[in-house]
Structures are given as C-alpha cells and as structure tokens.
RNA sequence: CGGGGUGUAGCGCAGUCUGGUAGCGCACCUGCUUUGGGAGCAGGGGGUCGGAGGUUCGAAUCCUCUCGCCCCGACCA
C-alpha cells in the first residue's frame, strides 16, 4: 500500500477529551475517530489492527475446537424476558422498538440467542459437547463511557458459548479455552495474568478474568508472588488477620463521650487510637431489608462480597434521608447496640476481637467494651472487606501484591442458569431429559488492541507488537531524488512479494514529517532510503522500539527485515 | 442519577464579564525558497458562533428553554 493513496490523517494536536495514552495515540495516529460518546469509527489504519487481532482470535478459537457463527445484533425482547434479564439487566441494556411497537434489544451479550439456537438444534447427548463463537459488535449503554476503545458503548467482542452433558465436560472445555486465551494474549506480547473473578450480571459458578497489567487499568487485581494466586480485588480473599488484639479491660458496656466525631478518623484521633482498633459500621438498603455490616475501622467494605453473601438482588448504601429512621441513630454514630437492622454481619477480621469500640446510635456517643451476643446480636461472620497490599495470601500466607489491570477477557462456568430458564435440554443415555451445562467466554477485541498500546508506547507514539501492527514495515523515501524513489519502490515491491504487510511512504513530504508520522503510528520496522547512503549503495533500517539505525545493501537489508518480521510473528 | 464545566473553521483555543463588521495557532490550497526528525516567506479558501424562542436599532456576547459533550462521584462486564 502506498501512503499517498491510503487514508491516514495524523493529528499534531491532541484531542481535548483524550484521557488515556491508548485513546490519545489512536486518535492522533488516525486509527479511530469519535462519532458520539463511547462510539467510534475504526479508520483504515485502526481497522487493520482490529482485523489482525480478530484473525489471531479466530485461529485460536478454531484450534480450541470452537465453530464460528454470527448471531444478530438486534434481538427480540421475548428471549430476554424468558431468561429474566429483561427485568434484571437495567439501563445498560439498550432497548428499542420496531415500527410495530414490538420490543427489541441491541445485544450486549448473546446467551439468550445462542441458548435458543442450541435448544432447537440439539436434543441428544450424542451431539454434545459443542462450542460456538462469534466476533461481533455489541452495545452496552454504559453510564460513563471513557478511555476510547477501552470502555466504549459500542465495541467488538468475541463471545463463545459451550454446551455440555456434565460439569466434568464443561471443566475440560473451560480449561481448553483458558489455555487458548493465554495463547492469544501471549501471541500479542501482552503482559497478562488470569485471575479469579466475580460473575456479576452474567451469573454462574466459577469465572476467570484475563488482565493486561497497565497503570491505566480500571480494575485492581491481587497477585501472590509465591504461589501465583491471583484474583480481582472485588473477589480476592485473604487470610483473616488476627492482629494486635487488645484485651478488654472491663467487662461492662461503657459509654464513651465522643463529641463532634463524624468520621472514623475523627474518633481515632479523639480517642488517640489507630482506626484498626475501632469498628466501622456500614448500613445497606437491600431487597431483603436493611443490613448492618461491621468492619475494622481501617478497612473498606466490599459491596460485591456482601451482596453475594446475602444473596440480595440489589443493594446500595443507605441514603442520608432514610438513615435515622432505618437505623435509629444519626450518621456518624451508627453501631450495632440496639440497632433496628434485622441482620448484622461482621468481617472475619473481627472474629477474635476482645474489645469492641462501636458507634452508640446517639449523637456524640460511642460504646466501649461491647460484647457480641450480649450487647447486640451475634453477627454473621464472613469475608466482607477488600483485600489490600500486604494481606497474607489465602493459600500460602505470602504478602499479596496489588496491580492495576485492564480486563480483556472473562470466562465463566455458567452451569444451568440459562438452560433451565429457557429449557435448553437434551436426552441422556437413559432417555432422561436434562438441562445442558453451559460455559461462556468473552474477549474484547478493541480493548485488547488498546491495552497493547497502553503497554507499549513512548513519548513519540505507539510501538506495535508485530502481530497486531497495522503494517509490519514502513518504507520511507527521503527526498525526491530519482534513484531514491526507484530503490524505495523496488524494496517496497519485493517486500510485498515476500508477503510482508508494508506501507510505502511515497508522499512528497519533508523527512522530519515522515519520520514523526512513522514513529507516531508505530510500525515495528522502518526502512529509510535516502540519497546520501544510497550513494554508497546502502539503505537504512531500524526497529521502532530502539530506533537503532543499521545500514546495508538493499538485498541484505531486505533479507534481514523479512527475517525480523517472521521472527516477530512467531 | 448527583455535583462541576463546556459548546466559536477538520483539530486546539481567544473573544462573552462591559452588545457594535467573527479572530489566533495547527491542518488545507497557490507560489517561491527549503529538504535526514513535525521548514520559512507571501498570498488564499473555509463559520447560519450547538439548537429554538425572547430582549434590542443591533446578540457569539443579555434572558428563557432545549440538546450534545467533558470531568468528579455513585453504579457496572
């Protein structure tokens, strides 16, 4: 491809709303263009990277034994009512009506359609297991889209769904898919880690997320440097720590006058105690009624863990306006003694605690020496806080590390949630009708490409991993000298013949402009043909990542570049 | 959904307070010079100032309504 005939529009100035590196560079390099909030055009350069990513994913999915199909992006509401998600999914689900006023959705995911497809086509255990995937545009009406392709509303996703007769069969496919995911990210040279995850809206039993490690990641993951335990902090458990437990110097519940101490830090400062010695009380409104959660004063409650423990459909922090009537005490002085909440939970870090300093449910008042079971109902203990750096690993006790990551893939063992709701069944060997056991496997195509940029760039632009670079090589002609143009053209043609993805920068531009553009777009390899070195029969080549220039005769450079591309692809 | 901002040329911005011929930089076009890391000079094209209504002799500017977008928070694969 010749640059002069290709559609590339690089920007010298940074669009004002670009927040993260990948978004800024993709916009500047002319890969994407924003059309509306969270909705982008993939310009030719960007599309090439997207398509290369898709090709890698297809290759690995096919290798893993999955069959590609393509489902509609517009789906009838009936299917979503059948699964129950028409009610449950919320505003993120884009609902639309057709001319007959019938309800449809623009698919954010495809469990319903695939389950509908499979239940019609498959009736016998002989036809199972089966694994189907598609690469397709989804729409999720995110509250706040941001970060370009990393959190768009419209995005391209690979989603696969597997159907089985048994959980063991699902486990096998799950492992095969997990390996396929690792291969995919490995092929893109992405520094990634699979972690245990919460199943969220999709549901199911086990689930892993694939995280690309990057500063700009929206998720935090814990990782054990010793045993490789990894988990999203939403989910991560750590051993409970039974640290410096103070004995209670009194056996009698005592009132503590604590004027003007709204926050846990205020109380700690007033009593001259570290907040870890205090107990923080959180109150949530849920569909099961108000729930009180007690955690160590220096820890943050983890709403996902709490919600999962309760089995609640919805849950949110109790609003200020309803606080007093619900708990019987003012905000800032809430505590379990005399509470109106039906259920009281406590984080397992409090299990061995002897001295409980808690809110008094009255303004400017706390209690000291409170005893669970005596002064307030014995709480339900469990893991209700978010793990932090240095917590002991749940498996081996080693201090955990915390990283930021971008969730590029998420795989789930769904079990029979959808197959039961939608009667997707098969007849087993004994003629018994059983629900199929399902798995589902998502992978964000655009997000993966963006995360590659987050991991690999410098001040001047993108540094593409070879397999997803829009072009593998750029040939830059320097100057209008006839011999230069002739040699550059020959080099370009020969690379094409070798099957290399090469862009020939044949524009009538100054060298500086061409080099800056090449660095910005980030072609892994560059060949520059200029009059000075050509006078000695030499041309120049360099890698984008270190820019170290090497000279050689054209045929020699060609051979080296072809070799470097092949090495970069394998 | 709550709070805060912002909308002026393809991109980045000034002008709005104090109403009076719509500006600057980048990009684009023409010419000359220049040519190994985003050139210089000269000339040029491009705007119903987000939209609707109002006040006024006169509105980018003041008033009312509306829409889009951005940031923070809450929420969420």
Image (cartoon, rainbow, N blue to C red):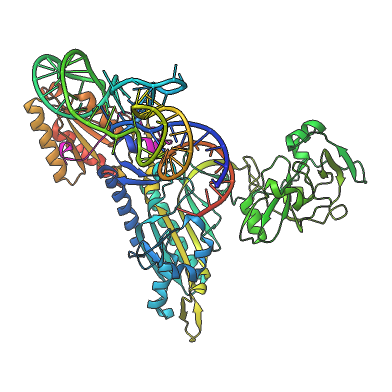
Residue A59 picture location, percent across and down:
32, 57
> What secondary structure predominates along the stretch shown in magenta?
loop
A504 sits left or right of A462 in the view: left
Q: Which residue lies furthest to the bottom in this view?
A: A431
Residue A163 position (above or below residue A483):
below
User: Is residue A2 rendered magenta in the image?
Assistant: yes
Residue A234 position (above or below residue A102):
above
Q: In which quarter of the image is residue A523?
A: top left
| Quadrant where the image shows the N terminus of chain A | top left
Q: In which quarter of the image is residue B69?
A: top left
A410 sits left or right of A479 in the view: right
**Residue drawn at 56 percent across, 50 percent down:** A231
Residue A162 picture location, percent across and down:
43, 67
Residue A20 position (above or below residue A75):
above
A244 sits left or right of A521 in the view: right
A136 sits left or right of A91 in the view: left
The range drawn in magenta is A1-24
Instruction: Identify which residue, A348 or A24, lies in the foreground.
Output: A24
Residue A133 picture location, percent across and down:
37, 63
Residue A456 appears in the picture as rendered? no
Q: In which quarter of the image is residue A25?
A: top left
Residue B18 picture location, percent across and down:
44, 20
Instruction: Identify which residue, A364 or A56, lies in the foreground.
Output: A364
Residue A307 appears in the picture as rendered? yes
User: Is residue A182 rendered magenta in the image?
Assistant: no
């Amino acid at each position: 491809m010749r640059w002069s005939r290709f559609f590339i529009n690089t920007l010298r100035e940074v669009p004002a709303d670009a927040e993260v590196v990948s978004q800024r560079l993709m916009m500047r390099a002319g890969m994407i263009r924003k059309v509306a909030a969270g909705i982008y055009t993939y310009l030719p350069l960007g599309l090439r990277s997207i398509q290369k990513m898709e090709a890698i994913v297809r290759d690995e999915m096919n290798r893993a034994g999955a069959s590609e199909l393509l489902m509609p992006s517009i789906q009838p509401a009936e299917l979503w009512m059948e699964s129950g998600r028409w009610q449950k999914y919320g505003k993120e689900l884009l609902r639309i009506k057709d001319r007959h006023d019938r309800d449809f959705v623009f698919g954010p995911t495809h469990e319903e359609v695939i389950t509908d497809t499979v239940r019609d086509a498959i009736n016998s255990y002989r036809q199972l297991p089966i694994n189907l995937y598609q690469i397709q545009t989804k729409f999720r009406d995110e509250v706040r889209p941001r970060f370009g392709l990393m959190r768009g509303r419209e995005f391209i996703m690979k989603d696969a769904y597997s159907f089985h007769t048994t959980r063991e069969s699902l486990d096998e496919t799950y492992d095969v898919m997990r390996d396929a995911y690792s291969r995919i990210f490995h092929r893109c040279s992405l520094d990634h880690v699979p972690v245990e995850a919460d199943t969220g809206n999709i549901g199911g039993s086990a689930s892993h997320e694939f995280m690309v490690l990057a500063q700009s990641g929206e998720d935090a993951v814990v990782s054990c440097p010793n045993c490789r335990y990894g988990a999203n902090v939403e989910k991560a458990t750590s051993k409970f720590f039974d640290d410096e437990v103070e004995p209670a110097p009194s056996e009698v519940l005592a009132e503590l006058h604590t004027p003007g101490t709204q926050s846990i830090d205020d109380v700690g400062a007033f009593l001259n105690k570290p907040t870890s010695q205090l107990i923080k009380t959180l109150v949530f409104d849920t569909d099961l009624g108000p729930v009180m959660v007690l955690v160590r004063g220096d820890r943050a409650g983890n709403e996902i863990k709490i919600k999962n423990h309760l089995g609640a459909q919805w849950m949110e922090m109790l609003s200020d306006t309803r606080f007093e009537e619900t708990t019987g005490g003012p905000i800032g002085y809430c505590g379990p003694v005399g509470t109106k909440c039906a259920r009281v939970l406590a984080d397992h870090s409090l299990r061995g605690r002897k001295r409980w300093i808690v809110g008094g449910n009255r303004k400017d008042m706390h209690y000291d020496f409170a005893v669970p079971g005596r002064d307030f109902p014995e709480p339900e203990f469990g893991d209700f806080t978010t793990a932090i750096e240095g917590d002991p690993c749940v498996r081996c006790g080693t201090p955990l590390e915390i990283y930021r990551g971008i969730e590029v893939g998420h795989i789930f063992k769904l079990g029979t949630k959808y197959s039961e709701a939608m009667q997707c069944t098969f007849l087993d060997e004994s003629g018994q009708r059983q629900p199929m056991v399902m798995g589902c496997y998502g992978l964000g195509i655009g997000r993966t490409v963006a995360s590659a940029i987050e991991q690999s760039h410098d001040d001047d632009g993108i540094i593409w991993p070879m397999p997803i670079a829009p072009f593998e090589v750029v040939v830059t002609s320097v100057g209008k000298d006839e011999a230069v143009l002739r040699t550059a053209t020959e080099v370009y043609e020969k690379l094409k013949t070798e099957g290399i993805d090469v862009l020939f920068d044949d524009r009538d531009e100054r060298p500086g402009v061409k080099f800056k553009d090449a660095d910005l777009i980030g072609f892994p390899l560059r060949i520059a043909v200029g009059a000075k070195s050509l006078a000695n029969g030499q041309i120049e080549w360099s890698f984008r990542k270190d820019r170290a220039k090497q000279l050689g005769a054209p045929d020699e450079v060609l051979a080296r570049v072809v070799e470097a591309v092949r090495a970069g692809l394998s």
